Image (tube, helix red, strand yellow):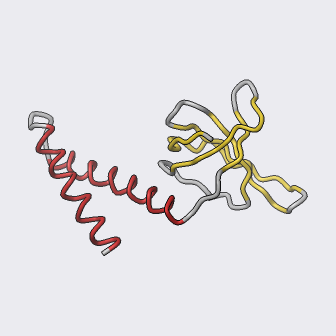
Amino acid sequence: MKQSKITQILEALEREGKYGKMFTIAMTLENWETIQINKKNKDAFKVWDNIKYEVIEEWKKRKEVKEENRGVQKQHGDQRGYFTSIAFQIAFNQYSWEESYQNCSNLARRIYSDMLDNYWG
């Protein structure tokens, strides 16, 4: 089983299958693989979602995959990744390039901690 974050959603093509309407979603991952997966919902994935998958068929440019079951624990992990990126965006906007990275990193950690406290209380 492989695991990576989604860096780009390339397309979501609608098709009719034996189980009704399905979407073939193509995406690029942080580990540089381009994969596609079938889902009933067009918006099943977002950029920076973490996905665990197994390659079931490989083509020249894309790999068809089967996703591991998504559970509650995984959703919390996705939320933490989102909070991390937001915290660093806010912190980088507060400091200029001339100021130290350590100041920016410390501010991002405080923002992240506050977001987690407010989210999970």
Horizontal side of 3 relative to 59 (left or right) equals left
Quarter containing the C terminus: bottom left
Quarter containing the N terminus: top right
* Extreme residue toward the bottom, this view: 121
For residue 37, above or below residue 83: above
Residue at 28 percent of width and 65 percent of height: 115
* Extreme residue toward the left, this view: 99
For residue 119, above or below residue 106: below
* Extreme residue toward the top, this view: 60
Out of 52 and 79, give the one closest to the viewer: 52
Q: Residue 108, image x and y in percent?
A: 21, 51
Horizontal side of 115 relative to 33 (left or right) equals left
Out of 73 and 25, give the one closest to the viewer: 73
Q: Residue 57, image x and y in percent?
A: 77, 35
Total numbered circles: 0
Horizontal side of 77 relative to 24 (left or right) equals left
Q: Residue 40, image x and y in percent?
A: 73, 60
Horizontal side of 64 relative to 84 (left or right) equals right
For residue 7, above or below residue 111: above
